Amino acid sequence: MFDAATYIHRRRKLAEKLNGKGIVLLPGHEESPINYAGNVYPFRQDSNFLYFIGLDKPHLAAIIDLDTGTTTLFGDCLGVEDIVWEGPQPTIAELARKSGVEQTATFHQLPEALSQALKAGRQVHYAPPYRGEDKIRMSHWLGIPIAELKDKASEPLIKAIVALRSYKSAIEVAEMEHALEITAEMHVAAMKKARPGLFESDLAGVVEGIALARGGRTAYGTILSINGQTLHNPYHTNKLERGRIVLGDFGAETARHYASDITRVFPVDKTFSSRQKDIYQIVLQAETSAIDACRPGVRYLDVHLLAARIIAEGLKQIGLMKGSIDDAVHEGAHALFFPHGLGHMIGLDVHDMEGLGEQYVGYGDMQRSTQFGTKYLRLARALEPGFVLTVEPGIYFIPELFDLWRSQGKFTEFIHYEQLDHYRNFGGIRIEDNVLITPDGHRVLGPHIPKTIEEVEALRQ
Ligand code: GLY
Ligand code: MN
């Protein structure tokens, strides 16, 4: 964790933004069983708890009293029998000191503290819970039916958290650059190791091992497949066949839990084929132009549409699209090839703060599009200094989607469907970097990770 002053400062800012009476409830996570209580998923603390309290252990909660400005940490000190299994652990008082928290109480005093606040008519601000276990206990503590917990979550708290976590401080940016150093190593290792006959899992094991060996973990499920056209493909079972390309979308999460999210694509062979090069160059141009367009005041929706136009124009040049590019993008025809958003905020969560609601994080007062493709854009609002976001355009050949649109006669004025049969086995290409918005533009975070065709092929020799 960072030093106590960081968390004291963050809690003070939160109280200032809420500028009212009542309490803020910040529940930490519990251990989550895989198949029985004693065999648990790797523990991952809730990101709001990490941001405001910093303590990376299960079975803790905090209440910030907005009237007095004090914070209470709820948790239990371990007895000797627990220590036999779990080793010596800091006391709750020691944990509270690390976070600069003034008061402590046992965990079973938490429901009572909440019910007293409710009886006194005080507002209990809480963020919408997203894990089943949390929903059950929050429902008990607050007397709110599970189905109503989301709607009754505190909008002022959600907005205050978004207003703080959206602007990354220097120590957070440094932490994310550290994540990217590890991620660079992971991508280079995958590019160097790949050869025909290996399985995707051979590469997945190498990259995940590096994240673990550097003291962290992966920030999200590793995507590493020759079937890159499947956007969130979790499987690593295919053999690497000559003629195919591998899409690797993976990144490290540091020990302090800051994420990175990088995508690169490389050929199973030593070089890309000329058809693969053509598509790769279009995606690369879309990515670098989109990055160049990132600066304060620019709406990310407009950067997304810029990338969509570059993709559509490039596909027209190689005979897969036709007609007016502006009209094609306006009507959403490009989404046959680029069916997702250009990117999202990143920080403690890989899709930062998405648990609070994408509208608050990415749109503010803007309306979200309902059009296939653009509706998946998670960040649309005007960029501001301190935002860190991903830029990740792609071109995918999804046979099921082009067969459907073709049978529906959809966008026949923009798509050369008859050409697409040559691309049924192509896969997908996405290129992704993580970008900080600075007062006068942007900075691509982390070390340069091989990205041009020449740089990638150099690692494949
Ligand atoms: N890296 C996966 C995603 O951005 O959804
Ligand atoms: Mn991403």
Image (cartoon, rainbow, N blue to C red):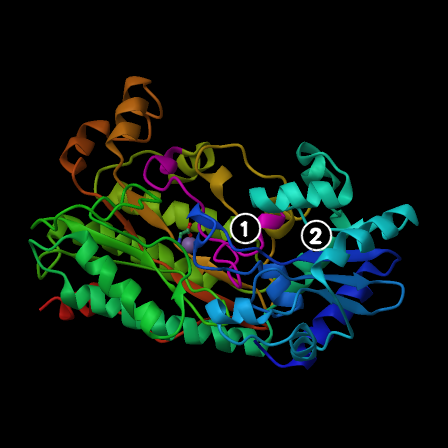
Residue 145, how many percent across, how many down? 71, 34
| Residue corresponding to mark 2 | 158
Does the closest atom of ligand 1 sit within 8 Å of the Cβ of label 2? no
Residue 143, how many percent across, how many down?
Answer: 77, 39
Residue 11 in view of the camera: yes
Q: Where in the figure is residue 447, as x and y percent of width and height?
A: 36, 76
Q: Which residues are magenta?
A: 333-356
Kind of residue at badge 1? Leu
Horizontal relation, residue 230 to residue 172: left or right: left
Nearest the viewer among 259 and 237 is: 237
Q: Quadrant of ligand 2?
A: bottom left
- Circle 2 crowding by C-alpha within 10 Å: few under 14, some 14–19, many from 20: many
User: Which numbered marker is on residue 379?
Assistant: 1
Q: CA distance from mark 2 to mark 1?
A: 16 Å
Q: Earlier in the sequence, mark 2 or mark 1?
A: 2
Residue 233 at x, y = what percent? 31, 44
Question: Does the segment drawn in magenta span residue 355?
Answer: yes
